[in-house]
Amino acid sequence: MSARALITGIAALFLATGTAHANDAPILKSLSPEIQKSIKETRGNCIRGVPTEDDDGLVAFTVSGKSAVLVDELNLCVNEETHQGVNYATGFSHTVDIYVRNGTWNKTVTIDATGEISLSLDDHDKFKNLVLSVHGGSPGCPLRDKISGTAWKREKCDLHVRWDGTKFVYRFLKTSKEAVHTGPQLPEQMTGTWCFDKELTEQNIGQEPIYLRSTCADSDVIVVKTDGFVTSNRRCKFNKIVGPSNPTDQEYWVWGHCVESAELGDRGRPVPMGNNGGLRFELINNLQLKIRGLPCMQ
């Protein structure tokens, strides 16, 4: 090999390596030094989990053509085996921030949430909506139980966040006048965002839909809450929950009604949520969620 060829090869390798490094963590590196520092500090405080790196846990999208990034504390520290977000703070609390770039990066949303969030983007990564829960006692979500000092852990309000073309606007999906469950509720381990797994469902003898903690298309997502669930075209509210007779079992029967609707603000038409109005939720090894009586997704 000639000296010129060797030098050319080394130069090409150097350029390729430099390009690869330049493309590492494009979301994180696009943020201001102050935001990057805040993310680094949050990851540094990850004690019982594994801190994510680079762009892991950050979600980029656009609003009115402007770049935006969502930073959820829950996704900056994850379980090493399941890669689920972990947070051992009281009440499963975590802060959700949204930054929008309009010349400079500005924090336009900051919400102290509880439980996992549901962020919906279109096929071009354009923001559609964000649904999350806030603790009872938060602004706009008064406590119903004013005696118990721990009522704020049990009482929640669901918050819908959308973009009106110039700013993010908020609307509570349930008011303080709505009943708070005093009987059995679905456990926290069942709540959050789940994705329909077609392969596991087809392998399942009973053909009951099986869901995993993962990322997927909006049409395959189900967001489970202690008092209901939401999919891309329906919102369901529980009015009766029967827990397991054996405390170690993770099987719950629920009854209620659903509103079939493509838009959260559309009242739709109430229909039973499953066979005889009931569904069975079963949590398997804290990794899979099986729902008997719920029609399979596409």
Image (cartoon, rainbow, N blue to C red):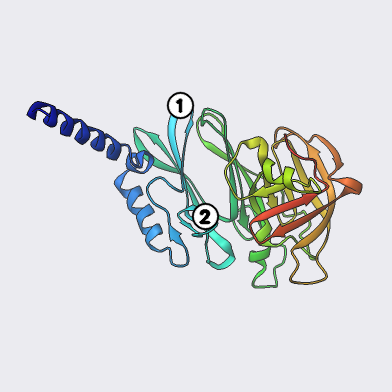
Query: Which residue shows up at 47% across the image and 32% down it?
Result: 62
Comparing 139 with 108, the one in front is 108
Q: Secondary structure at mark 2?
A: loop
Choose mark 2 or mark 1, whichever is in front: 2
Comparing 226 with 24, the one in front is 24
Q: Quadrant of the N terminus?
A: top left
Q: Are circles 2 and 1 on residues that touch, CB within 8 Å?
A: no
Give the farthest residue toward the right: 276
Q: Quadrant of the C terminus?
A: top right
Q: Position of residue 37 (x, y in %)?
A: 32, 53
* As drawn, 52 above or below 108: below
Dot 1 amino acid type: Gly
* As drawn, 204 above or below 21: below
Query: Which residue shows up at 40% across the image and 45% down it?
Result: 55
Query: Which residue shows up at 78% across the image and 46% down it?
Result: 236
* Residue linked to disc 2: 83
User: Badge 2, how many Cα within 10 Å: few under 14, some, many 20+?
Assistant: some
* Residue linked to disc 1: 65
Dot 2 amino acid type: His
